[in-house]
């Protein structure tokens, strides 16, 4: 029992880069469970086309919990998990570990506390609805009156701590690069660049949340300007959709050439593209507001700015796509290789759907319709979730060198990915179709002609969800089984670097350390240990002295037991 | 001559930016010449309304016409001006607009409480606009050439019962 508690403690208080990546991945999975549960609740309501207005209170709570958990839980944590893993692959380390750990817990507990208040205003929090609390509407079901301000303060803690965590990654990446002097790989470049984008844009969300809290607590002093607030919110609200995809682009550039068994088609544009994507992603926020009263010049800019960003996406798909197409034997039989391929195809499909949305001439037809819902969900289901699963699979491999999935597991994971992708791509297009024909989003009473579509969507979602669950569960199950078999069960994922010690390697270490003598072993173990493991433990510079001592002691004990057992057998 | 991957991508990027330029040019032309859809309408300070529609709205607001809607003819073209309010609990006031076939209509939309909107599908396309508290927003369209009823809806989440905020355009 004590061993399990020790593992849990180590997992939730990581000491190094890979451990932090694990922590953020686990948080992503946890929030994903909330997102999925709420989504299926919504789908239950939506199969009936004439829900009564009284259903609105529950339905919009579920909708808000779904959206908030997705954006502030899955996207925030998922993006940072991928960015941390990108740093690990490039041997960059987290220097401010305590600070990052504090930011992680403040962000996630802040979101949990806000959601306990059962928010009802939608994740986009458009004011003045977002601060309304009267007989007609209340922004939080449980936080009423002045307590509503606390709800927004919790959300501000979530966003503020996430922005601080992202900036910590940028600073620590810079510090550890300076110390090391090594060249950063393309994955880490994307990771660090978009950590910076996160750090710059999320404070706009924090500002809106604090503004709401202040307006609730000091109504006579602080007033909320709805239009200004929309601008502030969407300065964050549009780039947020890129927090996960663009670091995933980095993972494509890093991993896909390995599965394609050839170099990236254009190394130069894989690097230059970072500038187009990062700059353009921060200047197109107003394309969500084309039906709002803004001047003509601003609207004209929306189209140009958004299409400039689309150029960045076009470069990526062409660069990665040609790398795959020109390879003779892309390894799609590997679950990660297959997932990267799906995420690329999914991004092309979802991105094509997005093209009419920022165009002034066509936006008016599609704004607020299910077309928009179809587009961004298709991005989430294929690129974000499948792509993140691919990176997670690589994280498992990095955590336990020599580990790979069995043939059975590979088949199950591939089947799971197909079971997830086929229904959800179909749903994405069903959303698009009903959106094109005028089905408005968020409506709980809608024209009956759309009911068969909504039923089909709910049914397909029931089929698809087990697919992703199976893929992730099989991957994790295989990893845990291999960890136990390999004699590393005692090493939790929170001690990155350590899962990569094989028994034989550690035996060598013990022998080597034994030969050096006790004094040298206790004095230089961090330096010597790390140097010895460098190729397989990129995250190890933050490994502590005490952890290594314990490790050596543990392994020495194992060795003693084995020797004794051999003697007994003889 | 064999082109490197970098060089091929150079060409690809150039093509993409040319496409952006052409498309944006077409878009701006549509905006400035009024050949686009409803984009040029409904902007603040009348900046997107046709000139005769702006004059009709000004006349409507400066004269006590005595009702929520009136046909104004100050520039030789009769235009139906509707003063519409969208608010919680009841939705659209008025929720019935009666207009002639092929008649120009200007909606002057106020939303005193929360952000709301107006959404209606006509045979010629979608009419959609958002309204923000503290300012009026404007929507201009021409009614269909044949009689019929068209439902308008509230597309923005503005309260628990916003799905039920509907109204009818009756074209006679």
Image (cartoon, helix red, strand yellow):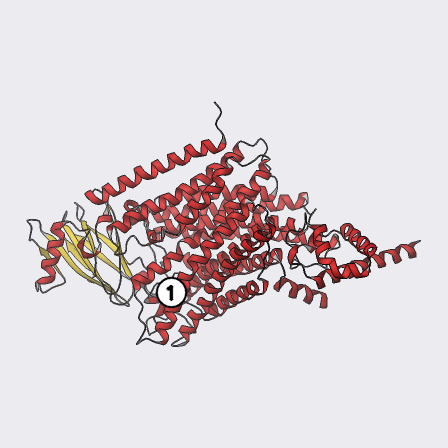
The chain holding disc 1 is A
Locate residue A360, reporting x and y percent. Answer: 29, 47
Q: Give the labeled residue for mark 1.
A: A208
Locate residue B160, reporting x and y percent. Answer: 35, 66
Secondary structure type for disc 1: helix
Q: Residue at x 57, y 45 (%)?
A: A183
A563 lies above or below A155: above
Task: Report whether residue A422 is seen.
Answer: yes
Task: Report whether residue A554 is seen.
Answer: no
* Residue A28 in the figure: left or right of residue A560: left
The quarter of the displayed image where residue B169 is located: bottom left
A109 lies above or below A260: below
The quarter of the displayed image where residue A557 is located: bottom right
A199 or A357: nearer the eye? Answer: A199
A24 or B80: nearer the eye? Answer: A24
The quarter of the displayed image where residue A527 is located: bottom right
Q: Please identify the residue farthest to the top as the structure is shown.
A: B1
A505 or B40: nearer the eye? Answer: A505
Locate residue A336, reporting x and y percent. Answer: 59, 44
């Amino acid at each position: 029992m004590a061993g399990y508690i020790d593992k849990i403690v180590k997992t939730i208080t990581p000491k190094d880069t890979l451990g932090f990546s694990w922590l953020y991945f686990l948080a992503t999975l946890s929030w994903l469970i909330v997102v999925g549960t709420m989504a299926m609740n919504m789908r239950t309501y939506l199969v009936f086309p004439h829900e009564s207005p009284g259903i609105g209170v529950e339905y919009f709570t579920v909708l808000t919990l779904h959206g908030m958990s997705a954006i502030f839980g899955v996207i925030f944590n998922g993006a940072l998990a991928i960015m941390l893993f990108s740093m690990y692959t490039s041997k960059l380390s987290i220097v401010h570990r305590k600070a990052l750990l504090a930011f992680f817990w403040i962000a996630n507990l802040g979101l949990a506390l806000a959601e306990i208040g059962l928010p009802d205003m939608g994740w986009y929090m458009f004011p003045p609805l977002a601060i309304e609390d009267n007989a007609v509407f209340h922004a939080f079901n449980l936080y009423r009156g002045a307590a509503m301000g606390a709800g927004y303060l919790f959300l501000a803690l979530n966003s503020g701590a996430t922005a601080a965590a992202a900036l910590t990654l940028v600073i620590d990446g810079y510090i550890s690069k300076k110390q090391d002097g090594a060249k950063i790989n393309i994955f880490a470049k994307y990771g660090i660049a978009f950590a910076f984008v996160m750090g710059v844009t999320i404070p706009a969300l924090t500002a809106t949340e604090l503004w709401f809290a202040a307006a609730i607590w000091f109504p006579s002093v602080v007033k909320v300007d709805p239009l200004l607030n929309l601008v502030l919110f969407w300065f964050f609200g549009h780039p947020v959709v890129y927090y996960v995809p663009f670091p995933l682009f980095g993972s494509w550039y890093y991993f896909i050439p390995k599965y394609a068994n050839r170099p990236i088609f254009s190394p130069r544009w894989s690097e230059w593209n970072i500038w187009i994507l990062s700059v353009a992603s921060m200047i197109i926020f107003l394309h969500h507001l084309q039906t709002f009263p803004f001047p003509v010049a601003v609207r004209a800019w929306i189209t140009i700015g958004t299409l400039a960003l689309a150029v960045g996406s076009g470069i990526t798909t062409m660069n990665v796509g040609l790398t795959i197409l020109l390879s003779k034997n892309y390894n799609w039989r590997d679950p990660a290789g297959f997932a990267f391929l799906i995420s690329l195809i999914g991004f092309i499909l979802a991105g094509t759907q997005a093209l009419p949305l920022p165009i002034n001439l066509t936006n008016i037809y599609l704004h607020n319709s299910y077309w928009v819902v179809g587009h961004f969900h298709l991005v989430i289901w294929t690129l974000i979730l499948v792509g993140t699963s691919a990176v997670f699979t690589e994280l498992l491999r990095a955590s336990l060198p020599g580990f790979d999935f069995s043939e059975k597991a590979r088949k199950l994971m591939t089947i799971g990915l197909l079971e997830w992708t086929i229904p959800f791509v179909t749903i994405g297009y069903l959303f698009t179709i009903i959106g094109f024909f005028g089905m408005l989003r968020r409506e709980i009473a809608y024209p009956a002609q759309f009911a068969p579509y909504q039923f089909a969507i709910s049914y397909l979602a029931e089929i698809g969800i087990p697919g992703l669950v199976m893929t992730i569960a099989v991957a994790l199950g295989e990893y845990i089984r291999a960890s136990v078999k390999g004699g590393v069960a005692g090493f939790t994922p929170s001690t990155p670097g350590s899962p990569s010690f094989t028994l034989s390697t550690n035996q060598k270490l013990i022998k080597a350390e034994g030969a050096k003598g006790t004094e040298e072993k206790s004095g230089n173990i961090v330096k010597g240990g790390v140097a010895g493991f460098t190729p397989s433990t990129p995250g190890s510079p933050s490994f502590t002295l005490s952890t290594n001592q314990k490790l050596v002691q543990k392994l020495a004990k194992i060795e003693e037991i084995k020797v004794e057992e051999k003697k007994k057998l003889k | 001559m064999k082109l490197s991957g970098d060089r091929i991508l150079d060409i690809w990027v150039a093509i993409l930016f040319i496409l952006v330029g052409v498309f944006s040019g077409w878009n701006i032309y549509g905006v400035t010449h009024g050949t686009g859809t409803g984009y040029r309408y409904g902007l603040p300070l009348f900046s997107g309304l046709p000139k005769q529609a702006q004059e009709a709205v000004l006349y409507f607001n400066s004269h006590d016409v005595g009702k929520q809607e009136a046909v104004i003819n100050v520039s030789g073209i009769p235009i139906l001006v509707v003063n519409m309010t969208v608010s919680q609990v009841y939705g659209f006031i008025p929720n019935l607009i009666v207009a002639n076939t092929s008649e120009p209509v200007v909606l002057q939309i106020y939303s005193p409480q929360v952000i709301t909107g107006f959404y209606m599908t006509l045979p010629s396309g979608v009419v959609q606009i958002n309204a923000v508290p503290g300012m009026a927003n404007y929507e201009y369209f021409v009614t269909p050439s044949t009689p019929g009823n068209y439902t308008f809806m509230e597309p923005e989440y503005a309260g628990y019962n916003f799905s039920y905020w509907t109204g009818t355009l009756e074209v006679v």
